[in-house]
Image: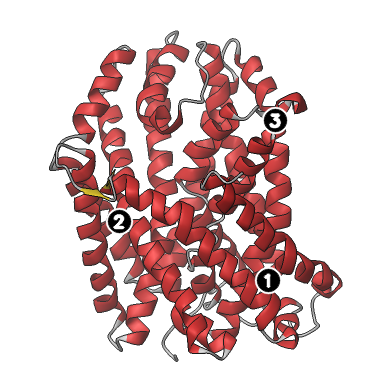
Amino acid sequence: MADRGNFGSRLGIILATAGSAVGLGNVWRFPYMTGQNGGAAFIIIYLACILLLGIPGMVSEFIVGRHSQTNAARAYASFSRGKAWGLVGVLGIITSTIILGFYAVVAGWCLHYLGASTVGKLKGDASFVQHYFQTFSSDPVKPAILGIVFILITHFIIVRGVRNGIEKASKLLMPLLFILLLIIVIASCSLPGASRGIEFLLKPDFTRVTPKVLLEALGQAFFSLSLGTACLCTYASYFTKHTKLLHSATQIALIDFLIALMSGLMIFPAAFSVGVQPDSGPSLIFITLPNVFQQAFSFMPILGYVISIMFYALLVFAALTSTISMHEIGTAFFHEELHINRSKAAWVLTIVCSVIAVFCSMSVGKADIQLFGKPLMEFCDYITAQIMLPGGALLTSILVGWFASKAIVREEFTNWETSNSKSYFSFYLFCVRYIVPISILLILMHQFGVI
């Protein structure tokens, strides 16, 4: 379509696509996964998984998107020359819409905590902080409103288009995110006793590596790069013909890894300095860390106050870079398939996601909203993370590796034989045909308790 637009610069491509991968999963999930799975040994395995699974998976979605230059549903149908494969794109759109709905609830929590830390409401012992979170998250109204607010913030970036909305926002948010993260890392690593946290993060202990750790690292690499959401396919549809896909995917994956590693350096030294193991799972950022920051910087309360504000600002920025990409997937679909302007398409998705967010938020609170025996928010997380995301990525690897024209795949991968990536094509094809699908099947089998 003539009015689709595209990214205006290579930097815009890298920052926007990296922003889609960098989110709460890097700042929150990666540190506690590392804490639960042995520290540095987990990180090394995680990096290997990014190289062998993540980058080939990213390139595959890039190939489908750039070749087709359209929304995800139409891209998969066009690339495969069969309407049935278009369902893979539809699956990605549905997945990202559900994720945006419940992800906005957590992003709204981050927004609330940014305000609460600014006005000094998070001061108190561990039991106070825990009670504060439980009281807030179970409120039937306020978290839902904040979730909608976050979706609306995302909406008003999306309606400005690819260059003036997504690209400009990414060029602002990603550097801000990196600067905030760097400042907190420096402050955290300067604390007394921080060296134990740094050592845990950087000194590998391979005696703790088990098959479970291998699969956890594989799963974290898979989810942190947004594989299977149709996000990479959608963003790639705005790439120019000059964009080097392998080079871009490698840069994005390394940025994603660097942010995750810096997140560990932000959290581990502070936690170890006050004797707290940062492996407390989902409660880490809302219950454990507020108290950690208070204790760690008790020698200078104003510094603890500033660090707390910066931390939750960091979370808000990280969440926003992800919600922008998830919103764009559905907006592009409705814009092109319903033949309506971009603003109306964005409103369709905003309304749908807001409804999901309201019901998910209520399911965390006092309302008994369940699906298949799980609170709605927990069910949405489960169905997308454990079934829909792996399923979409698995089908993409099968399509690109086995069913698509090898000549077209090679043309896109090598930029029509003009890039130096052509020497890696055979290895890429081997990865996407065998390593990626086998890895995803292992993840699925692990998640369902088969292995």
- Give the residue type that dot 1 points to: Leu
Name the quadrant containing residue 119: top left
**Is residue 327 shown above or below 7?**
above
Q: Residue at x 40, y 61 (%)?
A: 324
Q: Secondary structure at mark 3?
A: helix
Dot 1 alpha-carbon crowd within 10 angstroms: few under 14, some 14 to 19, many 20 or more:
many
Q: Are marks 1 and 2 in contact (CB under 8 Å)?
A: no
Q: Nearer the viewer, residue 435 or 196?
A: 435
> Would residue 322 appear left or right of 449 to someone viewing this image?
left
The circle on residue 101 is: 2
Q: Secondary structure at mark 1?
A: helix
Quadrant location of the C terminus in the rendered image: top right
- Give the residue type that dot 3 points to: Ala
> Would residue 403 appear left or right of 92 to someone viewing this image?
right
Q: CA distance from mark 3 to mark 2?
A: 34 Å
**Is residue 75 something that shows in the picture?**
no
Q: Residue at x 68, y 38 (%)?
A: 211
Tell me which numbered mark, 1 or 3, is placed earlier along the sequence.
3
Residue 77 picture location, percent across and down:
51, 86
Q: Are marks 3 and 2 in contact (CB under 8 Å)?
A: no
Q: Residue at x 49, y 84 (%)?
A: 84
> Would residue 17 appear left or right of 91 to someone viewing this image?
right
Return the residue at label 3: 40
**Is residue 27 something that shows in the picture?**
yes
Q: CA distance from mark 1 to mark 3?
A: 30 Å
Q: Point out the frontmost of discs 1 and 3.
A: 3
Residue lying farthest to the top in this orientation: 299
Return the residue at label 1: 245
- Give the residue type that dot 2 points to: Gly
Q: Nearer the viewer, residue 303 or 385?
A: 385
Tell me which numbered mark, 3 or 2, is placed earlier along the sequence.
3
